[in-house]
Image (cartoon, rainbow, N blue to C red):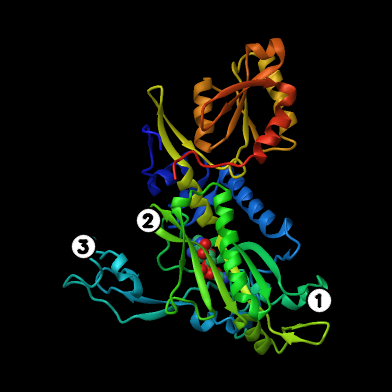
């Protein structure tokens, strides 16, 4: 790492930049806000779109063995009985009768007493804690006008079950044979007791899950395969190796359905924490849904062989990826005695790929040339035109939103139809003909990219 570069990225810095530059806003702010709920601004939406696109490309578009699905958010209530969520998707809760705060019984060590924040709950004589009670994390709703027996339903706490209940449809209609996968991207909802750390733990998040159905004797092989694939995806999109690790769960830590689980962890400002989980779910889900729905959910081969496939599941939320990528990219450096904040995002993740800037915003000729380049590029790329204010401030603004390249139209452009291209990371500038910019950008996007922040 260069001497003038720091890597003390705090969550506060990420929250502040996200808000200042319009990535993420605290939700319902004009009504006083709603804790741990967020709305995405323009650049947040563009960045999320890119993360979704890269995942879908790697998991579906570039493969022959995975198809997509988009299931309903509110499924038949029996789905959640079969999956084990009604009975088992709970956290143990403890209330303090003195400070009226609520804590997760298994996380008392990480919580602060309401009266004396330097102590943990239960550590002061005034603490008056209840016995632990089980609290279900699913959001309940009612279907129809009357709140009567049978109208109770749930917002899905994971997208996975929408995939399992469509296993038969895909097997028959998409004519698939194990090993094959079904991928889904969509909102999931959990009534988390202790949300927090910005987008890391929220109550509403967008999951990207893929269920890979395999012959049981191949499960271990595919489990290892998907850990590697997913780890490589993070590396490809710029997360530094030193900030990534795989942690295998011990038997006591695994979910009820799991025969093996590994977390890909990222070294967030809150410490090493789960970014993505990869689980070998065995035949638990298909067997449960077969029993509860009385529909056979198995694979029958041409030779008459039949089995219930095992499932390998990589599961992640866009929120956790977004926090990891923002943290990994955030940088502050001093250039020529001036400080700059820069997001060193992978070019295919950055919300804006290139900025098109006339050097002098009041020059009609420069504006005309710059706008014409912009109109041409916007048909294929996420680009932004900006002619307001001093050029240095415009560059700095683009640095803060992570725009990898800026094309500037200046006096020389008016003479020879060339522009400068400025590189966000190295700050190097080169000249190229305006007519070549489209091809240059296309090629630049396909180059391998490595974070200039040291590993
Ligand atoms: N279908 C399996 C499943 O949902 P999980 O470990 O509970 O497993 C999978 O969740 C992923 O979803 C996590 O690795 C994390 O990326 C994301 N996730 C879970 N709860 C979240 C929350 N409250 N806020 C943001 N992301 C969350």
Depicted 19 relative to depicted 124: above or below? above
Image quarter (top left, top right, bottom left or bottom right) of the C terminus: top left
Dot label at residue 172: 1
Q: Is mark 1 within 8 Å of ligand 1?
A: no
Q: Is residue 224 left or right of residue 168?
A: left
Dot label at residue 378: none
**Residue 50 or 264: which is nearer the viewer?**
264
Mark earlier in primary sequence (3, 2) = 3
Residue 22's x, y, as percent?
52, 41
Name the residue at the top extreme.
Answer: 415
* Residue 379 lies in quadrant: top right
Image quarter (top left, top right, bottom left or bottom right) of the N terminus: top left
**Residue 435 or 207: which is nearer the viewer?**
435
Q: Is residue 374 left or right of residue 3?
A: right
Taking the spot 64% from the left edge, 13% from the top edge, the residue there is 363
Mark earlier in primary sequence (3, 1) = 3
Q: Which residue is mark 2?
A: 270
Q: Which residue is mark 3?
A: 116
Q: For mark 3, does the 10 Å Cα neighbourhood hold few (<14), some (14 to 19), or many (20 or more) residues?
A: some
Name the residue at the left extreme.
Answer: 125
Q: Is mark 3 within 8 Å of ligand 1?
A: no
Depicted 451 relative to depicted 261: above or below? above
Depicted 356 relative to depicted 413: above or below? below
């Amino acid at each position: 790492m260069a001497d003038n570069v720091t890597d003390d990225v705090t969550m506060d810095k990420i929250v502040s930049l996200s808000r200042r530059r319009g990535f993420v806003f605290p939700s319902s702010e004009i009504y006083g806000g709603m804790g741990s709920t967020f709305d995405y601004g323009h650049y947040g939406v563009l960045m999320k779109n890119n993360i979704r696109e890269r995942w879908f490309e790697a998991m579906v578009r570039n493969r022959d063995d995975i198809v997509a699905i988009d299931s309903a958010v509110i499924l038949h209530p029996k789905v959640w009985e079969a999956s084990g969520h009604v009975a088992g998707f709970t956290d143990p809760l403890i209330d303090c009768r003195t400070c009226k705060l609520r804590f997760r019984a298994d996380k008392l060590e990480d919580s602060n007493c309401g009266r004396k924040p330097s102590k943990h709950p239960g550590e002061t004589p005034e603490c008056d804690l209840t016995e632990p009670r089980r609290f279900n994390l699913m959001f309940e709703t009612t279907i129809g006008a009357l709140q009567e027996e049978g109208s109770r339903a749930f917002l899905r706490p994971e997208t996975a079950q929408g995939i399992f209940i469509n296993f038969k449809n895909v097997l028959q209609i998409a004519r698939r044979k194990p090993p094959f996968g079904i991928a889904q991207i969509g909102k999931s909802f959990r009534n988390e007791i202790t949300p927090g750390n910005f987008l890391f733990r929220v109550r509403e998040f967008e999951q990207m899950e893929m269920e890979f159905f395999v012959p049981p004797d191949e499960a271990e092989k595919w489990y290892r395969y998907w850990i590697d694939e997913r780890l490589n995806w993070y590396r490809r999109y710029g997360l530094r190796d030193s900030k990534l690790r795989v942690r295998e769960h011990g038997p006591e830590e695994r979910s009820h359905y799991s025969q093996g689980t590994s977390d890909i962890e990222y070294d967030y400002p809150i410490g090493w924490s789960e970014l993505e989980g990869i689980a070998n779910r065995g035949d638990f889900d298909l067997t449960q849904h077969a029993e509860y729905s009385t529909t056979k959910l198995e694979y029958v081969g041409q030779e008459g062989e039949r089995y219930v496939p095992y499932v390998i599941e990589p599961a992640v939320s866009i929120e956790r990826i977004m926090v990891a990528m923002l943290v990994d990219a955030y940088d502050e450096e001093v250039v020529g005695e001036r400080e700059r904040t820069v997001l060193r995002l992978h070019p295919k993740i950055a919300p804006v790929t290139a900025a098109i800037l006339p050097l002098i915003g009041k020059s009609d000729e420069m504006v005309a040339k710059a706008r014409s380049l912009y109109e041409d590029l916007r048909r294929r790329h996420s680009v932004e035109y900006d002619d307001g204010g001093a050029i240095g401030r415009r560059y700095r603004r683009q640095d803060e939103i992570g725009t990898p390249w800026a094309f500037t139209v200046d006096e020389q452009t008016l003479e020879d139809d060339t522009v400068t291209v400025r590189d966000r990371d190295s700050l190097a500038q080169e000249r190229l003909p305006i007519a070549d910019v489209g091809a240059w950008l296309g090629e630049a996007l396909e180059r391998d990219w490595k974070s200039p922040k040291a590993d």
